[in-house]
Image (cartoon, rainbow, N blue to C red):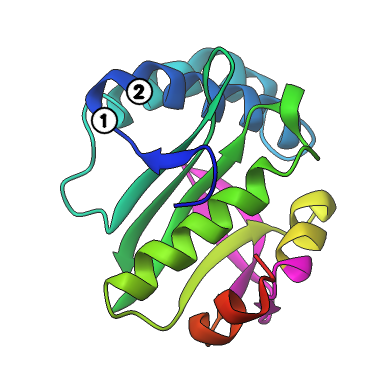
Amino acid sequence: MSSGVRHAHAGDLPAIRDIQLASWRSAYSDVLPPAFLEQELPGILEEKWRSLPEAAHCVLVHDGEGGPDGFANVIEKDGKPYVDNLHVHPEHWRSGIGAGLVAGVVRSLTLGGQNGFWLTVIVSNHRARAFYTRMGGKEGPEMTESLYGNPVRTVPVHWSDLGRIAGQGGT
């Protein structure tokens, strides 16, 4: 794993939940209804992060000085590894934590015999889209998805040669 990145354990779940909540509230305030972000999302994430997902390829956390400050969750979707979540606490955006998590995902999947992964990102999340492009991701066509009942425009991002990415140090 990259420096500071490790596999998550059950004790990390409250921090993972809190990181995702803070990240969504900051990044999606112009996309999702305020009532959803403030009233519904905390309960949804409490339930989601009650236990580590059994079907996950990996759940990684980045350890900061006060505990986890970022995480990535990789599951199987449409027959391929899918980054279901990659969040860094907003206080630590642009600090290199996200790049460390992507490197950890690449390393974990490569060791598991995988050679690619994908994710979706909300179209208006230009900060995240630019980050994924810098990390070697290739965008596909826009689509509309439902995010807990809220329609959002997303774009898939694919990585198809993890050996090349890891070899370049591009993560």
| Label at residue 9 | 1
Labels 1 & 2 near each other (Cβ < 8 A)? yes
Which secondary structure lies at badge 1?
loop
**Residue drawn 67% across the image and 29% down it:** 33
Residue 147 at x, y percent in the picture: 51, 46
**Residue drawn 33% across the image and 69% down it:** 77
Badge 2 amino acid:
Asp
Badge 1 amino acid:
His
Majority SS type along the magenta span: strand
Neighbour class for label 2 at 10 Å: few (<14), some, many (≥20)? some
**Res 9 → quadrant:** top left
Residue 95 at x, y percent in the picture: 77, 37
Any magenta on residue 135? yes
**Residue drawn 67% across the image and 79% down it:** 168
Residue 32 at x, y percent in the picture: 67, 35
- Distance Cα–Cα, label 1 vs label 2: 6 Å
| Label at residue 12 | 2
Which secondary structure lies at badge 2?
helix
| Front in this rendered view, residue 129 or 114 | 114
**Res 89 → quadrant:** top right
Question: Where are the magenta residues, as a range?
Answer: 133-157
Is 151 placed above or below 15 here?
A: below
Is 15 placed above or below 129 here?
A: above
Residue 162 shown left or right of residue 30 in the figure: left
Is 146 placed above or below 10 here?
A: below
